[in-house]
Image: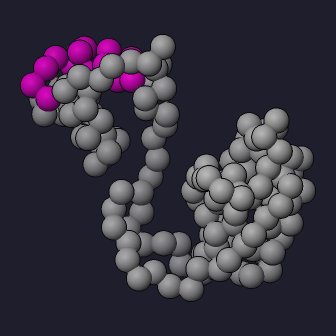
Amino acid sequence: MARTLDNLDHRLIELLKVNARLPMVTLAKALGCARSTVQLRLQALEDSGTITGYTVSVKAPRKDANIRAMVLIASDSKVEYDVVKGLSRRHEIVKLYTISGRYDLCAMLSTETTEELDAVIDKIRAIKGVVDTFSTIILSTKLDRPE
């Protein structure tokens, strides 16, 4: 059952997007409510699947990850969940999107070398349910706006 978010939930999420490590006391003070309220709201957001995890955001990309690529993936729709699960295990995949059209998924990869990229693409193709792939290397970033 989907949880309806109110203004307090939205404000809590925005604070956590900026710094997911803020102490409960700091969050409560910023939101103007009790620490126990923040704890309950946070637990409810996690339980409902609204908050799916916490991560680290770095200002600069890894110095050793020089090769970035986009891999379009066509999959058998009956096992797409398993394909996504298999792709999620690859640390080289930094983003994974569902897309429409000839391909079903778009994986954004980051590797140190073209040889490593080639090996990762081979491993993607070996995942049961992957029907076809199309890969392209990203040469440079012309625009990068925050999401």
Q: Is residue 106 left or right of residue 37?
A: right
How far from the left and from the top, in percent, is residue 125?
86, 60
Residue 73 in percent (x, y) is at: 74, 58
Residue 76's place in the image compared with 136, above or below, is above
Q: Is 83 placed left or right of 20 in the picture?
A: right
**2 left or right of 29?**
right
Q: Is residue 90 visible?
A: no
Q: Which is the main secondary structure of the residues drawn in magenta?
A: helix
36 sits to left or right of 53: left
Residue 7 position, x and y percent, is 19, 27
Task: Assess whether residue 2 is covered by the magenta stretch.
Answer: no
Q: Residue at x 49, y 34 (%)?
A: 52
Q: Position of residue 68 (x, y in %)?
A: 61, 75
Please tell me which residue is depicted at 16% across the width and 17% down the height of the picture: 34
User: In the image, what residue occupies the spot 89% across and 47% down?
Assistant: 128
Residue 66 seen in this snapshot: yes
What's the magenta region?
A: 31-45
Residue 147, quarter of the rendered image: bottom left
- Residue placed most toward the observer, 42 or 108: 108
